[in-house]
Amino acid sequence: MIPVSLRWVGDVAGHLELIDQTLLPAELSWLPCRDVPTVVEAIKSLRVRGAPAIGIAGAYGMALAAGEAIRGRMAAGHARAHVLARAEELATARPTAVNLRWAVERCVGMIDRLPSDADAAALATALLAEADAIHDEDRRLCEAIGLHGAAVLPEGGVLTHCNTGALATGGAGTALAAITTAWDSGRRFEVFADETRPLFQGARLTAWELVQRGIPVTVLCDSAAAHLLKTGRVAACIVGADRITANGDTANKIGTYGLAILAEAHGVPFFVAAPSSTFDLSLDTGAEIPIEERAAAEVLRPLGTAAAPDNAKAFNPAFDVTPARLISGIITEHGVISPVTREQIHLVLRARSLGNSP
Amino acid sequence: MIPVSLRWVGDVAGHLELIDQTLLPAELSWLPCRDVPTVVEAIKSLRVRGAPAIGIAGAYGMALAAGEAIRGRMAAGHARAHVLARAEELATARPTAVNLRWAVERCVGMIDRLPSDADAAALATALLAEADAIHDEDRRLCEAIGLHGAAVLPEGGVLTHCNTGALATGGAGTALAAITTAWDSGRRFEVFADETRPLFQGARLTAWELVQRGIPVTVLCDSAAAHLLKTGRVAACIVGADRITANGDTANKIGTYGLAILAEAHGVPFFVAAPSSTFDLSLDTGAEIPIEERAAAEVLRPLGTAAAPDNAKAFNPAFDVTPARLISGIITEHGVISPVTREQIHLVLRARSLGNSP
C-alpha cells in the first residue's frame, strides 16, 4: 500500500480529510476538516506535518475559508476580507517551514487576480482549483525528487531522519521518495530510520510507511547514529527540509544538524531533498530562520508517559539549522544542487522562475 | 536529599537492598536481594546500573553467594566451588562495563587468600568485608573525582549524558559528582541533561537526582545537543565511562561518541570522569571492547508504549566507543589525565598500583 497524507472530498462545498498522524502507527484515522480552525489546530498539533503537506493543507484551508464565507452568506467584500484574514491564521500556524506561507500566499495571489466583486462562490471555486493545482504539482515534484534522489544515492545503506514520505507531502515524499524510488527500481539496501525524538516521526511514520510498502526498515535511537555510521553500514544520509536560505543553510527537524556533523566526521555524504518552494531567498543565511520552540511535555512526557520528575525543565527546539558546507547536495525537482553554493542555488532556481516544472 | 543506589542490611546473614531504578522517577522502591539470581536479574534488567554501582552490587552478590552456601549447609570445598561458580554468573551479567568483573575478581582474590579449609561462614565474613571495602572505597573515589572534576570544569553551562550520579555509584557519582561538587561549592551555572534514549537515564535518573538536591536541571532530547552547543550555552560536556582501554578510548552509554564529535565541532571541552578501576589495560584500543546489544523493545516501545509498527527492526547497541583524541581529559580519583595519551594514563595509574588511594 502506498500511503497518502490528505485528500479533498467532494466538490467546492466539500471538505479536507487528513490522516491524524498523531495516532499512527497504532491507528489509521482520517480527520475531516470542514473549517479553518480545524485545519489550524491540525497543523499546530502536528496531526498533519511535513513542510510540503502543511503547505497543501494550508491551501485547502483557503478553500475552506471561502466555504465558510458561502455558509455565512457573506457579501463579496466581506467574503474576500474573511478569506484574507483566514490566510494569515493559516500562514502563521507554524513558523519555521516556508512552504506553508508560500502556499497560502499563492492562494492570496489567486484572489488578487479575481475581479474585486468576485463573490464567495467564485472565491471558493478559484481557491479549490489553486489548492488542487498545488497538490497536483507536489505529486509531480515528489516524483521528480524521487528520481533525482535515487540517481544520486550511492550503493549501500541509507540513514534518514524524521519523516519525509507520503505523510509529509502530497505525493511520494522528498528524501523518503529517493529511498523508495531506488528500492522500487530494484536496488536492495539497508534502510535505517532515526526514531526522531521528541515526536518519534521516524519510528511512528517513516517505519510505518516503509512497512506498508514492504521495505525492511531498522529503527535506531537518534543517539545511536554516530555508532551506526562508524560501522560503515551507511553509505549516505538523506533528510528533508523546512526552509532553505539563499546560501543553502537548511532548517529541518531537530537532530538534522547533529547528524550532518556526524556524517561529515565519517566521510558519509549528506543529502537534503526538498521542492524548490522550500527555498526562502528573502533570507540570506540560516541565522535568520525563526526556530519554533515547542512544549516541554513533548520532551518530558514521551508518548504521554512521564519520563522526568516534576520540576525538571526542558529545552525543546523543533528545528535546527544545518550549514550549507555540511550538505553534499540539495535534491530538488529540477535536479541536484551540488556543491551547495549561492551560485548553484541561483542556477537551479532560475528554472523555477522560468516556470520549468518537471 | 542526597540519593544512594544500594545498601547492605544487617550482618553477615543479611542482604543487599537496591533502588529499583527502572521505577524512577515515578516510584522510589527498594528491592531486597537475598540471593545471587536476584542480583544478576537486577543487573541484567538495569534495576541497578552504572559501572561503579554494578561493581559494588556484584561484590555484595559474592557475599550473598556465601550466604547461600551457609543456608545450604555446604561443606568447605563445596561452598568455595559454589561461590566461585556464582562469581562467573555475576561477572558476566553485563559485558561492557569492566568494573563488574573487576569487583568480582577482587572478591575472588580474597577467597584465594583464605585457607583452603575455610568454611562457608568464613567465606561470608571475608566477602562481606571485601564488598564493604569496595563500597567504602567507591564513596571516597567519588568524592575525589567530584573535587578534581569541579576544579577542571570551566565557568558556564554543563551538559551531561546518561546518569553518573549517586544512582550509578556507591557514592556521590563520577561526572555528576563534578557538577554537584561545583554547585555545592557555591558556583551557579545551567545544568543540561541529555534524556539518553533508549532508557531515559538522563531524564529519569539524572534529572531526579538533581531535583532531589535542589539543583535546577534542563532536559533535552539527545538529538537537540548539537543545536544547544551552537547556542554557546554549554561550556563543557562531562560523561562517565564503562570501560577505558590502554590508549584512552572510552566505552560509555550509547550517544557519548556522537556527543564527543559534536563537542569538538563546537570547540567545547569534553571530559570523562571515572574511577581508575574503569581502566582495562588488557585492551589496547576501544576496538576490542565488546559492545552489548540490547532488546529491540527498548527502542521500539519507549516506556512500554509502542512507537513503531510491528515488523520494524531495531538497532540497539547499549554503548559506543569514544576515541581518546576527542576527550579533553579523564578525571580519576588520582587527578585529571590530560592530554589523554598512553603515557599520561600510565603515569596516573601508577598511583593506583602504588596503593595511593585518595
Image: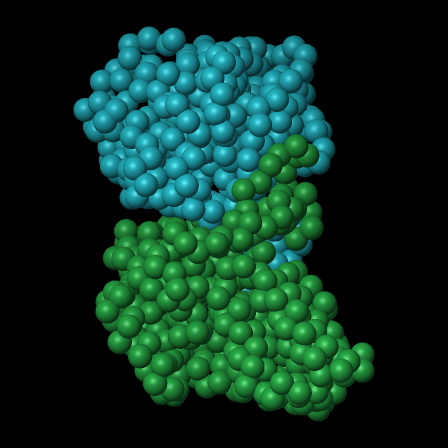
Chain colours: A cyan, B green
x and y, in percent, of residue A246 in the image = 26, 30
Residue located farthest toward the left when viewing the structure as drawn: A343
x and y, in percent, of residue A185 in the image = 48, 12
Residue A201 appears anywhere in the view: no
Residue at position x 55%, y 35% from top?
A218
The foreground one among B39 and B83 is B83
The foreground one among B279 and A328 is B279
* Residue A120 image-quadrant placement: top right
x and y, in percent, of residue A75 in the image = 58, 19
Q: Quadrant of the N terminus of chain B?
A: bottom right
Residue B162 appears anywhere in the view: yes
Q: Quadrant of the C terminus of chain B?
A: bottom left
Q: Using the image, determine if residue A220 lies above or below residue A147.
A: below
x and y, in percent, of residue B335 in the image = 31, 79
In the image: residue A34, left or right of residue B2: right
In the image: residue A282, left or right of residue A40: left
Residue at position x 38%, y 8% from top?
A358
Residue located farthest toward the right when viewing the structure as drawn: B72
Residue at position x 64%, y 61% from top?
B44
The foreground one among A123 and A96 is A96
Q: Using the image, determine if residue B124 lies above or below residue A319.
A: below
